[in-house]
Image (tube, rainbow, N blue to C red):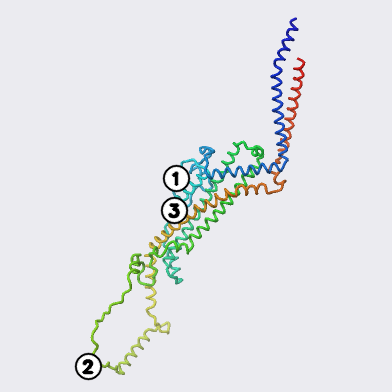
Amino acid sequence: MLHRWLEEELARRYRDAAPATLALLQERCEGAAAELVAAESRLQAAEDVTSLRRAAMQHVFAIANQVTALLNGATDPDPSQHGMTTEEERASSSKPQWPAVHGPVRPQNASLRLYGGAAFERCLDEFQEAAHVVQFPNVAQDKVANVLLASKGRGASGGPAHTAQDLARNIARELLGPLLETACSRLASLLRHAFDIAADSQQLLQDPSHDTLRPYVAFHAALRSAYHSFIAHLEDNCKSLMRHHLQAATSEFAVSSLTGLEDLHIDDRADVGATSTSGDDYENADREPLRPRESAVVDREPLRESQMTVPETPSPDLLAAGKSGRRRDFLAGRNADNPSPTKLRGKPQRNATAANMFNDQVKNSYSVICGTAEKMFNKIRQGVTCHAAPSSLKSAFLQPLSTKLASQISIDLLACTDDEFMAMFTAAGAVAVLEARRDSLARRVEGLVRCKNEFQELARCL
């Protein structure tokens, strides 16, 4: 009696739990079947070149659009996580120090954590601040004398002015050249950091192409290498462009155009007695018109005939005495070692006097030449760092990134044969792992389906 009651109670409980158990088994079977379909699709995609190329192209364009958005200005992702201060940018760059700058350079917003276009603009401001810190160095007097005396020896006019121009041009090339190359390297480092931010942001998005390419590490490494190669090419072009700008700004024609005659307060008339003349004297000399010299003789009446005298004719004795005196002087001028007459006996003394005067001119003109060269250097620095360099750097870096980035990287990654392209996806054991996972999911689905069918038959019997 008790045994029968227990069987009926157990059958009743089985009947009550059968619907929920069948529903759970059905859900498990459907979930396992969906995973099996996904594994099959991944395995097919790994072996399908067309689908991989499509996914790779979509991912490349998504990364390029993300980089462009960061350069145009964006608030996502969080700047506190991905932005950097000026000190952090310097530490991450290959050239943390500005050449020829001794001391800290703090641009505006140096403590803010910026990335993308904002960090690019701040780096340009820092470059201009560093350029203004660079000062005209002390030039040795020997260097000035070498250039000035060489121009004098060539017989070139305007020796001091040309000396100041040569000094300004050479020093501008020595100081501004490394500064421009450092600016290009710093900006390229910021653009490489923008790719890292774009890649991290792309992983957070629910992108089917990224999900397909997620397990392929070789493809992501090739994508990063292609982007860095693109940035390195832009960096080389920018350095070449900056060198061209600097050469153009320090050319002889450009320096002459920048200075003008009113700024060259140097007396170029080295052969005249004056060694240096101020600009005011030149201006006054230009303003005053040339006046005829007043006659020192007072006008008087012409002499009458009674007042005129006949000049005396010298006697032959006086003429002979004069010739003999000149003869003795001529013979006295002979050298004992050299029988030829020294007609220009006073010439060495005059040459020594001229050399001393020219040496005094070099010493007196040193400060004037250095001052003029410093003014020219400041004008060259102003023209290069404040006008030519910022606009050229923006156009050389930002414009290709917005117009050529996606196409250039796509060409580097996809413009190859199928075998070369599949080398980024068919890593050692990758297909075998996908096949093993597919087989495991298939066995699991088979077991769940069998269990569901058996329980369904048991529920019917109850």
- Image: 176 above or below 438: below
- Which quarter of the figure has residue 63? top right
- Image: 382 above or below 73: below
Estimate the spatial distance between the alpha carbons at disc 2 and disc 3, rounded to whole Å: 85 Å
Residue picked out by circle 3:
134
> What residue is shown at x 74% (from left), y 30% (from top)?
442
Taking the image as shown, residue 250 lies to the left or right of residue 44, namely left
Residue 78 image offset from top left, x and y in percent: 52, 37
Q: Amino acid at mark 1?
A: Gln
Estimate the spatial distance between the alpha carbons at disc 3 and disc 1, rounded to whole Å: 18 Å
Taking the image as shown, residue 289 lies to the left or right of residue 97, namely left
Residue 356 image offset from top left, x and y in percent: 37, 70
Taking the image as shown, residue 153 lies to the left or right of residue 237, namely left
Q: Name the N-terminal-most of marks 3 and 1.
A: 1
Q: Name the N-terminal-most of marks 1 and 2.
A: 1
Report the front residue among 177 and 397.
Answer: 397
User: Looking at the image, which residue sits at the far top?
Assistant: 1
Q: Tell me whether the residue at label 3 lies in contact with that at label 1, contact meaning CB atoms closer than 8 angstroms.
A: no
- Which quarter of the figure has residue 3? top right
User: The C terminus is located in which quarter?
Assistant: top right
Q: Amino acid at mark 3?
A: Val
Label 2 residue SS: helix
Residue picked out by circle 2:
306
Q: Tell me whether the residue at label 2 lies in contact with that at label 3, contact meaning CB atoms closer than 8 angstroms.
A: no
Q: Amino acid at mark 2?
A: Ser
Residue picked out by circle 1:
108
Question: Which is more foreground, mark 2 or mark 3?
Answer: 2
Mark seen at residue 31: none
